[in-house]
Amino acid sequence: MRRTLSISRSFILLAVVSCQIVEAARKPNFVVIFCDDLGYGDLGCFGHPTIQTPYLDRMAAEGQKWTNFYVGASVCTPSRAALLTGRYPIRNGMMSAKRRVLFPDSQGGIPASEVTIAELLKSQGYATAAVGKWHLGHLPQFLPTAHGFDTYWGIPYSNDMDSQKGFPGYRQMAKKDSNYVAPIEQFNVPIVHDTEVIERPADQHTITRRYMQKAIEFIHQHQDEPFFIYLAHSLPHIPLYAGDEFLGNSRRGLFGDVIEEIDAGVGSILATLKDLGLAENTIVVFTSDNGPWLTFDTHGGSAGLLRDGKGTTFEGGMREPTIFWGPGHVKPTVQREMGATMDLLPTFCSLAGFDPPNDRLLDGYDLSSLLLGNTTQSPRDRMFYWREEELYAVRVGPWKAHFITQGCYGREPKREVHDPPQLYHLEHDPAEEYNLAELHSEEIAKIKSIAAEHMKSIQKMENQLTK
Ligand code: MG
């Protein structure tokens, strides 16, 4: 009798221990929610006075709100390449002075030699999904399913491409009426499922809701295994569309309706993770690919107190409102240290317990210690601001030197080379208003030497955007 008891007690003990091992071995899930052309000032929790983002505000309060978080480029295609590969896009041919992004007639895309976050996580047993705008090549060899994603559902390039004749000029209409909604037939953009076109033109009125639903379906389907979802919203890039439930609700007008719909979708995704008991083992990141498209005036977003927007290397083009959430991992705080989308690749590797690739130069840093609250200092102390195929500016600590400046899309300032470079203290002057070059030549010398070292590491690849 005693022996039986002892055996069953051992069995229970063994079962408990093996459950703990399984629990400890379960790698964290990752969800990246990536907007398009969202400005630093476009969320309630980043100071917008009329756009309401209660779900993102709560996400920021429960997680880490990052106030110095960058993208690898100030336009769509190169910025996306940077996030997924952990490298400045100048290293993989995804930046060009002739064509700034990929177009429906482009023959290039993300090279097969690049390693994406999805490929790395997939090799570790993750289920992987891309939902939304891709913009890293629409030919089959460049689509998400050829770059580590098990499945894809979304538009292969920007929502204003495949523009059709016979419609009023969008920019003129939007400038006259910031609530202007174009007929969906004007932009004959397809929806692709894996590699097949399943809808054309995409019904963009419902697209934000459908992206969110696809992400939630994937979470349900893969709740028993580790998963990675890259949810790249095609909005608030123009043309703007909002679902019926949101249209006309925001005091900010149509642009606000769009953001408030994205916000509600974030709320649904976080609620799903909580309902399924996955919240403690999931990390959700919210950010955007580049700053606001200012040439659309009140129809586009706002960089808040930051200077300029999409297309430029001023802060408004490349600093993004960013939130990390993960109740089991991320220590709640306002994070004022530096980070960048290129850091996601090494950070996810670290959190999932494996090494990033060592056969190439990565530009990302492992931010996991900052996220977990084990340190207060970021391993990232510098940021290189590339525009097209030139290094325009460099930040080291709080100091940023502009070697070249240029406004977005034909706006002032026209391209100007600065010698000595303009120098701004970004912690005292985030709006880049007060050039301190004459007072701090030692900071300029330091940044110049770091820039020269960086340039030595650049080996340009075949350009993918001009193919
Ligand atoms: Mg964009």
Image: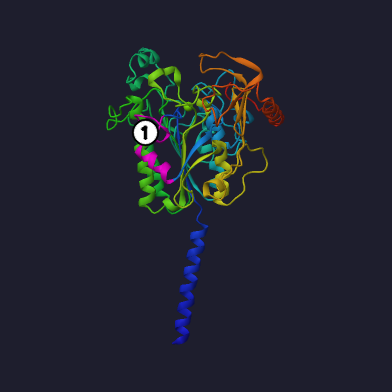
**For the magenta stretch, what is the residue range?**
42-62
Residue 161, horizontal then vertical, whole percent:
44, 21
How is the protein colored in the picture?
Answer: rainbow
Q: Please say whether residue 58 is one of the residues in the magenta stretch.
A: yes
Q: Is residue 187 visible?
A: no
Residue at the far bottom in the pictured view: 1
In the image, 100: left or right of 261?
Answer: right
Q: Please say whether residue 112 is one of the residues in the magenta stretch.
A: no
Front one among 283 and 121 = 283
Q: How many marks?
A: 1
Residue at 35% x, 12% y: name it: 168
- Give the quarter of the figure containing the N terminus: bottom left
Residue 256, horizontal then vertical, whole percent:
35, 28
Q: Is residue 63 above or below residue 402?
A: below
Front one among 311 and 207 = 311
Instruction: State which quadrant residue 339 falls in.
Output: top right
Q: Which residue is mark 1?
A: 208
How many other residues sit within 10 Å of disc 1, few (<14), some (14-19) or many (≥20)? many
Front one among 184 and 77 = 77
Instruction: State which quadrant residue 313 falls in.
Output: top right
Residue 387, horizontal then vertical, whole percent:
59, 23
Mark 1 residue type: Thr
Q: Is residue 439 above or below residue 126?
A: above
Q: Is residue 128 visible?
A: yes
Residue at 60% x, 30% y: name it: 89
Residue at the far front in the pictured view: 439
Residue 234, horizontal then vertical, whole percent:
42, 30
Secondary structure beneath dot 1 equals helix
Q: Is residue 377 above or below residue 42?
A: below
Residue at 36% x, 42% y: name it: 267
- Give the quarter of the figure containing the C terminus: top right
